[in-house]
Amino acid sequence: PPPLPDWLRHASPPVAPSPAPLTPTGLGGAKALPGEMSGAVDEAAALRRGRWLHLLLEHLPMWPPADWPALAADLLAAEAATADAGGTAADTATAAELLAEARGILEAPELAFLFAPTALAEVEIAADFGPRRLVGVIDRLIVGPDRVLAVDWKSNAILPERPEDVPEGLLRQMAAYGDALAQIWPDRQVETALLWTRGARLMPLPADLLTAARARALAEIAAIDPAPVRS
């Protein structure tokens, strides 16, 4: 028989586990303006409300407006049974308020392009972010021949007047989306925007703001990760 290689007689060395991937919402920084959150209960309620609104904006556009009230009631009832909801259901007044807020967005003529048949909803992405892998989900993605636009819904109660006032955590999130999309479509112009659901206001985010937010996030990652940071 042929001689066996020496490595076959030894156990393989232990493999260091890969670090968990980053998420765009987990890059640090505040997610709301001062005064919006006053405690854990308020934060939990705000997150729950945002989850409900995301659910309506994801599914209602696929149905005629006449069906929205019944569909919204079914969606919110089904979501209450999930583990994330912990059995918490939207009461009648809250459900009506959520439907009105979603309707204001879905029926705004200037926002119709976000719900066109070519728009992509709840798009999963994966890309590098510095020395780490990043995975996330983009609420709405518009892919054109020369331009890519990522939009994220935000249901904050206190809204910034200018992009410069957007909380740091949201800027880092959108910078991560833009960074990932630039890797996926290097030949296209990548833009990002936040849609503030209260008031149905779309806020494009300037590239320089996102570049600075990305640099701050990467600096924090580099401080705890010895791997070289991608420029």
Image (tube, helix red, strand yellow):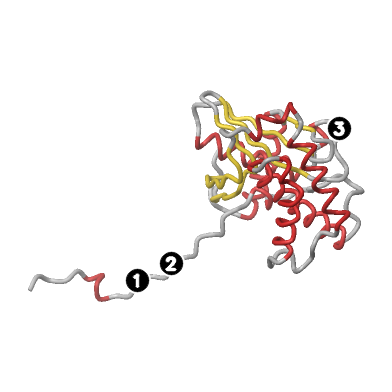
Whole-number angstrom distance, CA of label 2 to CA of label 3: 50 Å
Residue 3 in which image quadrant:
bottom left
In this view, the residue farthest toward the left is 1
**In the image, what residue occupies the spot 64% across and 44% down?**
218
Indicate the position of residue 129 as horizontal and vertical percent values. Answer: 57, 45
Question: Where is residue 195 drawn, in percent x and y?
Answer: 75, 37
- Of 162 and 59, nearer the camera is 59
Q: Amino acid at mark 3?
A: Glu
Res 47 label? none
Dot 2 alpha-carbon crowd within 10 angstroms: few under 14, some 14 to 19, many 20 or more: few
| Corner quadrant of residue 225 | bottom right
Residue at the image point whose x is 57% and y is 50% from the top: 135
Instruction: State the image coordinates of residue 145 (x, y, percent, origin top left).
Output: 51, 25
Residue positioned 66% across, 47% down in the render: 59
Rendering quarter of residue 217? top right
Measured in 3D between alpha carbons, the distance from the residue under mark 2 to the one under mark 1, in whole angstroms, is: 9 Å
* Mark 1 lies on residue: 12
Considering depth in this image, is 148 or 64 the residue closer to the camera?
64
* Label 1 element class: loop
Sequence-first tag of 1 and 3:
1
- Amino acid, disc 1: Ser
Residue designated by label 2: 15
Q: Are marks 2 and 3 in contact (CB under 8 Å)?
A: no
Residues under labels 1 and 3: Cα distance?
Answer: 58 Å
- Of callouts 2 and 3, which one flags the residue occurring earlier in the amino acid sequence? 2
Q: In the rendering, which numbered label is found on residue 161? A: 3
SS for dot 2? loop
Of badges 2 and 3, nearer the viewer stands 3
Q: Quadrant of the N terminus?
A: bottom left
Q: Amino acid at mark 2?
A: Val
Q: Secondary structure at mark 3?
A: loop
